Amino acid sequence: MQGYVASAAHVRRFALSIDADEFHCLLSRLPEQCPTIVLGFIEALDGGYSNSAAVIQNRTIVGCYRKSHLLAQEGIFIAGQAVPLFETDELKFGINICNDVNFPEAPQTIRSQGGDLLVCCANNMLPRSVAQQWKDRHNKIRAQRCCETGLWLLSSDVTGSRDENIALGPTALLNPSGRVVAELPLGKPGLLLSELVL
């Protein structure tokens, strides 16, 4: 919502609390009955900041997940401690943010709470050579988490370029055996629609 740059200046300028006017304005623009939305944002907390994802249902923020496995360049953020479970239409899901999915314990916590789906919000904006090296590795790591836990996994990754960096995705749905069921073309923005059958 505010763009994602982990510099102290950017975070301090754009961080929002969940009760900020900007959030209320956004929520008021949504239809009363809309799909559940998982929205990444830079959150202002008492005494610090978090790389967070808000879960929005029927114009209401029903909860937040805060990234727990921070990268070295994310020192401005406070690491989250909780792995909450959310529910929509009998589908139970939890959230990981980017680097979190490299660690098995958070997805396992979602599964142990009875979760069906891991939603992975990612921002793999990388130097061009690194992005090329990683373009096929993201889904391999995500598939490993599926195989370990039996969870479905829905990833939403950024695409585009900024300065000398590029983001290729992937945005994809993987089944519990780690197979890609649906995926957007790498480097292309779009809307991924797919049916998840439990």
Image (cartoon, rainbow, N blue to C red):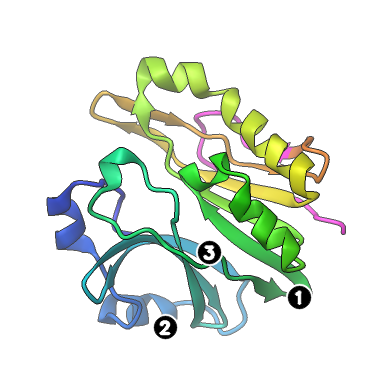
Q: Which secondary structure lies at badge 3?
A: strand
Q: Earlier in the sequence, mark 3 or mark 1?
A: 3
The residues colored magenta run 182-198
Residue depicted at x 50% and y 39%: 189
Badge 2 crowding class, 10 Å Cα cut-off, few under 14, some 14 to 19, many 20 or more, is: few
Nearest the viewer among 139 and 163 is: 139
**Residue picked out by circle 1:** 89
* Magenta: main secondary structure: loop
In this rendering, would 1 be left or right of 47?
Answer: right
Look at the image and tell me in which quarter the N terminus lies: bottom left
As measured in the structure, the alpha-carbon distance from the residue carrying label 3 to the one carrying label 2 is: 16 Å
Q: Which secondary structure lies at badge 1?
A: loop
As measured in the structure, the alpha-carbon distance from the residue carrying label 3 to the one carrying label 1 is: 15 Å
Q: Position of residue 162 (x, y in %)?
A: 28, 33
**Residue picked out by circle 3:** 38
Q: Earlier in the sequence, mark 3 or mark 2?
A: 2
